[in-house]
Amino acid sequence: MPLSDYQTALVTGASSGIGAATVERLCAAGLQVHALARSAPQLQQLAERTGCIPHAIDVTDLPAVTALTQEVAFDIVVNNAGVDRPGSLLAADADGIDLLIDVNLRAVLQLCRLTLPGMVQRDRGHIVNISSIAGAYHFGGNSTYHATKAAVHMLLRQLRIDALGRRVRVTEICPGRVATDIFAHVHGDSTDTQARFVEGFELPQAGDIADAIAFAIQAPIAVNVGLIELMPTLQVPGGLTTLRPGDVAR
Ligand SMILES: NC(=O)c1ccc[n+]([C@@H]2O[C@H](COP(=O)([O-])OP(=O)(O)OC[C@H]3O[C@@H](n4cnc5c(N)ncnc54)[C@H](OP(=O)(O)O)[C@@H]3O)[C@@H](O)[C@H]2O)c1
């Protein structure tokens, strides 16, 4: 179906990266797009460029998010806002765990709770959640991030069941590494970070992920695109590590 069969969309984490590209893609298709993030200046620039409606709101601010969902009946909700903290659980701090749960999981659950019933009632709607290959595979990284993204994966499966019988579609977009500022946001904006995660790699761009989201939304109404995994061609997950007692993991 044409994207414009839907009228309104909400994209969280819209001030940069995948969220901003998604706002741009949906605005270009003629939808009224509400862009949510904390950074007001970036949202304002995005609004001037695309015509989206900016909302400088923290996605964990439940009263503000509730008020927005009561004002607008969203046809499309893209749960994209996400954060990470580097390091394994051995070095994790309590605040980091709370932050990841709050932004990556609690806010997603709350926004689904606030918008899914209206979609079910109207027999029309599409929820898109951005997870990560961290929710599907194990590799060196942040265990809390992996846990929150795995939870988002399972939530999507459950939403399909919750909405069964209505034309409400649910899509998980599961990216591997994408060339966005997430690495600067997590590891600090330095040449070191660029060299470690971006420079010289052939990576999907934010617009490629936005195109995948648009593909799922544009599918005929009888088709629910449940899961799209997008990774760099030159990236694979997995591996097996076996140590002797006392060996140090690398
Ligand atoms: N890039 C990758 O390699 C990759 C891979 C797999 C999955 N992902 C996932 O893709 C999604 C988008 O990531 P990205 O790469 O585009 O990263 P990004 O450039 O760092 O964007 C993250 C967005 O989330 C917003 N955000 C963070 N905390 C927020 C909060 N409390 N309230 C509202 N908005 C908040 C940020 O805006 P403000 O700071 O202005 O609030 C920003 O717009 C995330 O869920 C991420 O986990 C990314």
Image (cartoon, rainbow, N blue to C red):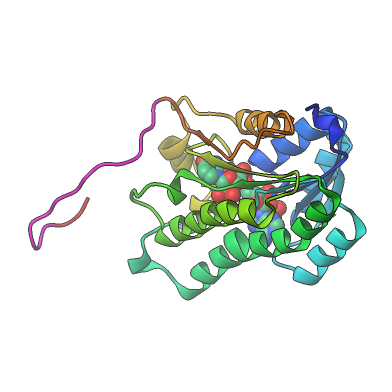
Q: Image check: 237 left or right of 41? A: left
Q: Image check: 227 left or right of 245? A: right
Position of the N terminus by quadrant: top right
Q: Which secondary structure is most common in the magenta stretch? A: loop
Q: Which residues are magenta?
A: 234-247
User: Residue 205: which quarter of the image?
Assistant: top right
Of residues 131 and 247, the one nearer the viewer is 131
**Which residue is found at the position 63% from the left and 50% from the top?**
160
**Which residue is found at the position 55% from the left and 48% from the top?**
131
User: Residue 142: which quarter of the image?
Assistant: bottom left
Does the rendering let one see residue 164? yes
Give coordinates of residue 60: x percent, y percent. Answer: 69, 66
Is 99 included in the stretch rendered in magenta? no
Of residues 119 and 130, the one nearer the viewer is 119
Q: How many marks do you count on the picture?
A: 0
Of residues 194 and 53, the one nearer the viewer is 53
Q: Please identify the residue farthest to the right as the structure is shown.
A: 71
Give coordinates of residue 172: x percent, y percent. Answer: 58, 44
Of residues 198 and 243, the one nearer the viewer is 243
Is 237 included in the stretch rendered in magenta? yes
Give coordinates of residue 58: x percent, y percent. Answer: 73, 62
Q: Please identify the residue farthest to the front as the structure is shown.
A: 165
**Which residue is found at the position 72% from the left and 40% from the top?**
20
Give coordinates of residue 84: x percent, y percent. Answer: 51, 56
**Which residue is found at the position 36% from the left and 61% from the top?**
88
Q: Is residue 19 above or below residue 211?
A: below
Q: Is residue 143 above or below residue 211?
A: below
Does the rendering let one see residue 82? no
Q: Image check: 128 left or right of 53? A: left
